[in-house]
């Protein structure tokens, strides 16, 4: 899939904002340690969603706001959920997809939620039938707890219909 874009100001708040300039002046900032802490928080969040991959590695670069995810997912749906979980984190602008898949399947599309969207409208856009909104909800579970709880800037997996 390559690089996926996200809105860095939207998403789960897993790690704090940058230090204030006064704090930064008082003590040197260990950028590598901050990136490692953020990487670990994102990896923990992915696993907390019940998602995993063999040799799952998550690396965050705070200067570019890019998360790189690597490893081997069991299937395409798990891979896509891992990528969306990593990207729907505040301060993440892009996800560099280095995941492979044990059992490949057709790739999904991705949709960035805008104001006024709901799963019915999104299903109508991609499938021509709003009643297929449950496919989108299931593809984004467990990150989505309710079909009514989507927000502007959130990126959703739109699975291929087979």
Image (cartoon, grey):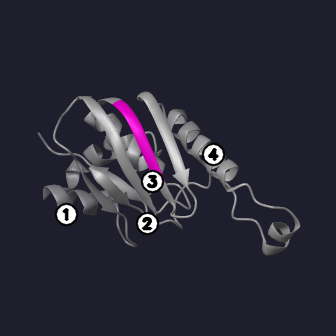
Q: Position of residue 78 (x, y in %)?
A: 34, 35
Q: Which mark lies nearer to you, 1 or 3?
A: 3
Label 1 secondary element: helix
* Closest to the observer, 127 or 31: 31
Q: Which mark is residue 36?
A: 4
For residue 125, the mark is: 1
Q: Nearer the viewer, residue 25 or 58?
A: 25
Q: CA distance from mark 3 to mark 2?
A: 11 Å
- Nearest to the eye among marks 1 and 2: give it: 2
Identify the residue shown where x is 52% and y is 33%: 47
Which is more foreground, mark 4 or mark 2?
4
Residue 146 in view (yes/no): no
Residue furthest to the right = 26
Secondary structure beneath dot 3 equals helix
The numbered disc on residue 87 is 3
Q: Secondary structure at mark 2?
A: loop
Asked if 158 appears above or below 102 in the picture, the reply is below
Residue 84 in picture, x, y percent from top left: 40, 49
Q: Earlier in the sequence, mark 1 or mark 2?
A: 1
Say how many tags the image has: 4
Disc number placed over residue 153 in the picture, else none: 2
Identified at 34% across, 38% down, the residue is 99
Check if mark 1's residue and mark 4's residue have beta carbons within 8 Å: no
């Amino acid at each position: 899939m390559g690089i996926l874009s996200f809105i860095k100001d939207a998403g789960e708040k897993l790690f704090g904002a940058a230090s204030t300039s006064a704090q930064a002046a008082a003590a040197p900032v260990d950028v590598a340690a901050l990136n490692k802490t953020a990487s670990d928080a994102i990896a923990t969040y992915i696993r907390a969603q019940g998602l995993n991959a063999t040799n799952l590695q998550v690396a965050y670069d705070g200067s570019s706001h890019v998360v790189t995810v690597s490893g081997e997912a069991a299937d395409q749906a798990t891979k896509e959920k891992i990528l969306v979980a990593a990207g729907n984190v505040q301060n993440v602008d892009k996800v560099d997809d280095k995941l492979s898949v044990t059992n490949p399947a057709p790739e999904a599309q991705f949709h960035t939620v805008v104001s006024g969207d709901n799963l019915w409208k999104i299903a109508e856009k991609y499938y021509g039938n709003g009643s297929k909104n449950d496919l989108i909800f299931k593809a984004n579970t467990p990150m989505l707890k309710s079909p009514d709880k989507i927000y502007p800037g959130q990126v959703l997996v739109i699975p291929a219909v087979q």
